Each structure stands twice: as structure tokens, then as C-alpha cells.
Amino acid sequence: MSPLTGWRAALRIARRDVLRAKGRSVLVAAMIALPVLGMTAADLTYRSVQPTLADELTAKIGSADAKFEAAGVGPIQVEQPPGDAEDWYLPEGGSYPEDDGNDLSVDVPAALPKGSRYLTEQSAPASVTTRHGVADTRVTEVDSGDPMLRGRIELVEGRYPESEGEIVATTGFSEDSGLSVGDRLTVRGPGRFYTLTGVVELPANLREKSLYALPGAVIAPWQEAADTDKSVLPPQASELAWLVKGPSGTGVTWPDILAANEKGVVATSRQVALNPPPNSQVPAAARSEQEEPEDGQTEATLTVVTMALLEIVLLAGPAFAVGARRSRRQLGLVGSCGGTRGQIRAVVLASGVVLGGTGAAVGAGAGFGLTILLRPMMENLSGQRFGSLAVHPWEILAIALLGLVTGVLAALAPAIVAGRQPVLESLTGRHGSRRSSRVLPVIGTVVLAGGIALAMYGGLRGSTQVVAAGSVLAELGLLGCIPAIVGFLGRLGRRLPLTPRIALRDAARNRGRTAPAIAAVMAAVAGTVAIATYTASITAEL
């Protein structure tokens, strides 16, 4: 008979057994579904929060084609990589100009592509009055109502400023200051009053606490007040930046940036960043290639997640052990009808397949639904809006497959025990205590020692992946030793009072059920210790 035919029969028997014991089946499926739900929701949230290159560009330049600014070394040639204007260099053999009183200013508008439209942007730290007193914030002068700012600044309430006496605040500033649309505030530098006409948010930084006014509304009056009154400190304004919309929608090209670099101007262009030129056309290509630092936090998180997954596997084991025990007579009937031990094991494993698959499917679907339902809360917790719900099908499939494998692994130990049960004992319900395997504790001890040694080696080398592998091996090795430990404790029960003595003997007699339960508690404690150690280490590092 084909093995596939035997598995079809095993799956049918398992499905009927699952429907017959609905309470236990729901419990096991829920134990598998909950972790799958959590991992699915976490994966969707993490992927959605991680900004793409296009999202990062929108956070910097909004809907504009590029952002131009002076390099700050005067009208001399500079070199920059295509992606970011912050990392620029002087040409080979070039030198900074000497500050001998000459004008080192740069005419940035003259370096912009011909026919382009632009906005100016400048900011300065300031102290403003609120309902609760005085607050420190940052005031940015930019025409926030212009379409070029869409995607970077979005209106939540009210309207954008239309005159120099009006200003808008971010949601974070509005909540902390107690100010709402229509209220007035004072910027203490120039000592001028401004009316709050609207509340805006920065989708890339929902926690931002700042103010936005029209160009010339705050910094210029502030500088005039400082020039006439020496008791007024001048504004510490940032350098001007120009948000540019290319001519006729052609965008800002790499030749446009090279031409600007010759005049001491650098630029961040959407078109160039998304479609960078070949290195042969980038003068600064050799100097801009740097290795990214390793993300140690990601590797440390891998250790915690690995421990948590092992805990999930062990937590579902006792439920399968109880189910296999209650199905002993049914399994005995399978054996009495000519079923082999392998087929009996297949029936128990098929229960793991059915319940694991059901739990994985329900958990993945609920994870999608929960992420969509709690999306506003997740965005507030992460401090940024999701660009879109980023779904990586292979990752979701891997999580669901992990739930299925979890069900199969949880049913593995009960399946092995069920396959060893004599048919007569299964039919009569009688069973005696058996000696635990002499080989399993030896293998478990060797694996435990090897896991501890591997984890210590990984700790000394600073490799969290090796630590994770060693920790898992150590737990698996200890799991292999649990039946022998339970049997040893059962023999010590004769020295205890009646109640604990009976409990220990019952535990030793039903090791197939006791071992997974102890392993689940062990895994829970180990996972808690791992998370606590990780959290304490991160806190100490900060």
C-alpha cells in the first residue's frame, strides 16, 4: 500500500477525532494560533513601519523633485554621491578656501535647473508661550500649504497659514501646549504674536513638536529685533534650503546635480536616488562606499525569538499527550485491525497536522485582521504612518508553516509513546510503569553539555546567532533528560508523605505526558530569563 494512502486514512481519523473532542481541539489550535497571530501581526507591522527609499525621500522633500542647499564652503566645486547630499567631498587635490574676508556665499537659485519652481525652507529653535507656560520648540519657515510639501506635512485640522501673523503646529506640539486652532502664541525672540490657524502632522514623525510659518514671518523680524535691541539674542537659524520642482515635470537629473556641484551646491533628487547613475558617472563613487555597521540588536532579537519559538513547541506538547492518552482505545483498535506501529504514530502525528494547520491558518488570518483593526494604534506607537500595509508573502507563509511544524513537533513525543503501547494494554486501558530509555539521557546529557559550551563560546566571541543555537541545543538536551529525571524522582517518592508520593508515582508512570509539561514550564522560565536578560542588557547599554 502506498504511504500516501496510509496518511490519507490517518488524516481522516485525526479529523474525526478533532471534531469529536471539540474542547481539546480548540485549546490546542488556539495555543498554536496565538503565536502565529502575534508573529503575523508583528511581521506586518514591522514591514509596514520600515520606510522604503521612496518613503524616506518623501519624508525629506515631500512631493518636490529635489532639495538643493549650499555645501557651506563657498562657490567651489564639490562632489557628492547620488543618494544623499549630506556626504559630499572636495575633488581630489582640492582645498577649502581661506577665510580672508572674501564673500563665500553661494547663489543657490542660480544653480537650479532652468525653468524649475522652488520653495525656500529655514528653521530656528525658539521659545514660545503656551497655556502651561513656556516651551522650547523649533519654528520652520516654509509655505506648508504648497503642493510640494504633500506627503511630508499633512493638514489635520484648520487651514495652512496665509499671512505672516499666522502659524500652524504639529499634533505633538498642540497636545503638549494645550493650544488649539484660533489660539494665539508668542515667539519670545521677536516678541510677536501669531494666531494658530491649523494643526498638521508629519507622517514620518508623528511625535514631532514644532511650528510652521510662512517664509519671512519669524526669523527676519527676530533678526531685526536683535539688531535694534542688544538684549535680544539673534536667531540661530539653519542654512536656507530650496525645494525644487523640475521644469515641465522632467524632474532633477544627475547632470543637473553635477552642474550644481560645480557651483558649491549639493542636492537630494528623487529621480536620481531611485534610479542612480552608474559609478563611472559618479566622481565620488570610490570614497562614498562604506560598510554598514552590523545590527547587533537584530541578532539579539533573533536569540529571544528562537527561545520563544521553542517554548511554543513545548507548550502544545502536553495537550497532545492528553489527547493521545484519551484516544488509546481508538489507537488500540487500529492496531487490532492490522495497523502497524508506524501507522499508529501517523494517526497521532496527523492530529498535529490537522490542528497545526488549522491554528496556523486561523492565526495568520486573525493577524491580518488585527493589524488592520489596530493600525491607528500601531502607527501612534511607532510614531509614523504606514506608507502601505507591506505584505511579504513568503514571510507570512513561513510563519504559517512554522505553526504547522509546531503542531507536528508537539505531537511527536505522544506519537512515539502511542506507537510503543501494546495493543492489549491500549484496549484494556491498563498500563504499568516502564523504565526510561538508557540511551536518551546519555544523548540528552551530551547535547546539553554541547549546547552550554556552544552558548559560552558564542558569548565570548560576541555572536548572538551562536548563543541562540547553543541555547536551543541546551534546552533540547535537557528535554531528553527529563524522563530519566522524572523516573528518579518517582523512586524518591517513597520517603515523602502520601499525597506527594502518589503524585510523583503518577508522574513517573505517565512520562509521555509529564515530560512535555515539565519541558513547557522549563521553556517558559528560560524564555522569561532570556527576555529579562536582553532587556536589562539593552537598558544598561543605553
Image (cartoon, grey):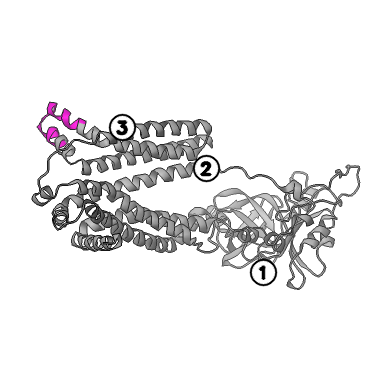
- What's the CA distance linking mark 3 and mark 2? 36 Å
Q: Residue 14: which quarter of the image?
A: bottom left
Residue 133 vs residue 229: left or right? left
Q: Residue 456: which quarter of the image?
A: top left
Residue, disc 1:
147
Residue extending farthest to the left is 428
Residue, disc 3:
442
Of helix, strand and loop, which mostly describes the magenta segment?
helix
The disc, 3 or 1, on the residue closer to the chain's N-terminal end is 1
Residue 133 vs residue 510: left or right? right
- What's the CA distance linking mark 1 and mark 2? 39 Å
Q: Secondary structure at mark 2?
A: helix
Mark 1 packing: few (<14 Cα in 10 Å), some, or many (20+)?
few
Which residue is pictured at 51% across the width and 53% down the height?
A: 382
Which residue is pictured at 14% across the width and 33% down the height?
A: 500
Q: Nearer the viewer, residue 189 or 63?
A: 63
Residue extending farthest to the top is 495
Magenta part of the chain: 488-503
